[in-house]
Image (cartoon, rainbow, N blue to C red):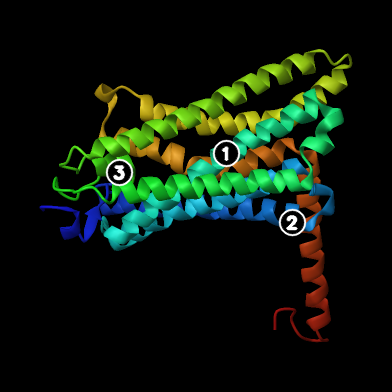
Amino acid sequence: MSNSSSISQFLLLPLADTRQLQLLHLWLFLGISLAALLGNGLIISAVACNHHLHTPMHFFLLNLSLTDLGSICTTVPKAIHNSLWHTTAISYMGCAAQVFFYFFFTTVEFSLLTIMCYDRYVAICKPLHYGTLLGSRACAHMAAAAWASGFLNALLHTANTFSLPLCNGNVLGQFFCEVPYILKLSCSQSYLREFGLLLVSAFVFVGCFIFIVFSYVQIFRAVLRIPSEQGRHKAFSTCLPHLAMVSLFVSTGMFSYLKPPSTSSPSLDLVVSVLYSVVPPVLNPLIYSLRNQELKDALRKMMTGWCFSAARDCLLRSVPGSHCMS
């Protein structure tokens, strides 16, 4: 293949070698995607429908759930399709779309996690200024900045990556399209330009991570100065879900990109890529809902309301001698 224009499709890494294992992975991925859709969908519905949850923290959580939905829908459906139809192919445009949306949602998610850290910092360290620093307009501007930065970062990386000449085949060692694996197919020194962009993005992510660490140092210092044990416990409980989500997001990504090349293998790369691309969107709703009493109460009330409405409609539709679902 002389250049990228002659490539009509890429070949992804299969999830398994045998048909039985492929079907097993299909059902596993299907269960994971349904769990992510259900968990994040419930959080979005609860925050949107409950006026008590119209706070900055829950507003950013709603945006985070939207990014998790987008992230899981970027990689998993194609993997399920390929396992179902026993293929590894993805079209050139489909690959470009995966790269764009993967960068888009990843950037937005980490930006939102950084903003949510700032929210916890202001709430605990500067509670008297919380309404001023995190008013509705400020929250809307910060969320818009997160989504805009994700779009710009994704556009730059996608346009730059797919403008490179590709002449080293079309086989990607990953179950979805990812820039480092596409760059291995390049036969031009212009791939250094994309590495430069990746380096800039890495510095931005490191800067956000340093900000998160510095903020939590200040938060823990402020919490330890709270005289009552109940007050300290309440302050810590509001930070633990966010801290757990940041740890999950950062640890899986760092393990993937910073692991020694000598330990790399197709099976290990596949497991690690699932950890940082599929697992966080599933666990984030669970982590946040388990430690957030207000959110749990809203979810319980919403589920009870749905069950009551369904039972009421069922009774209204029923007639003597007939079944409810008839």
Q: Is residue 291 visible?
A: yes
- Disc 1 and disc 2: Cα gap in Å? 21 Å
Quarter of the image with the C terminus in it = bottom right
Residue under label 3: 174
Numbered badge on residue 48: 2
Of tags 1 and 2, which is closer to the observer?
Answer: 1
Q: Amino acid at mark 1?
A: Ser
Is 53 positioned to the left or the right of 247 in the image?
Answer: right
Q: Position of residue 40 (x, y in %)?
A: 62, 51
Q: Earlier in the sequence, mark 1 or mark 3?
A: 1
Q: Quadrant of residue 310?
A: bottom right
Q: Amino acid at mark 2?
A: Ala
Is 76 positioned to the left or the right of 173 in the image?
Answer: right
Q: Amino acid at mark 3?
A: Gln
Q: Earlier in the sequence, mark 1 or mark 2?
A: 2
Q: Position of residue 62 (x, y in %)?
A: 67, 49
Numbered badge on residue 91: none
Are discs 1 and 2 less than 8 Å apart at CB?
Answer: no
Q: Secondary structure at mark 2?
A: helix
Of tags 1 and 3, which is closer to the observer?
Answer: 1
105 or 317: nearer the viewer: 105
311 or 176: nearer the viewer: 176
Q: Image point 34% across, 39% down: which residue?
A: 270
Of tags 2 and 3, which is closer to the observer?
Answer: 2
Is 256 positioned to the left or the right of 205 in the image?
Answer: left
Q: Secondary structure at mark 3?
A: loop
Is 133 positioned to the left or the right of 97 in the image?
Answer: right
Q: Image point 15% across, 59% down: which residue?
A: 6
Residue under label 1: 111
Q: Is residue 296 visible?
A: no
- Disc 2 and disc 3: Cα gap in Å? 37 Å
* Residue 260 higher or lower than 32, as above or below: above
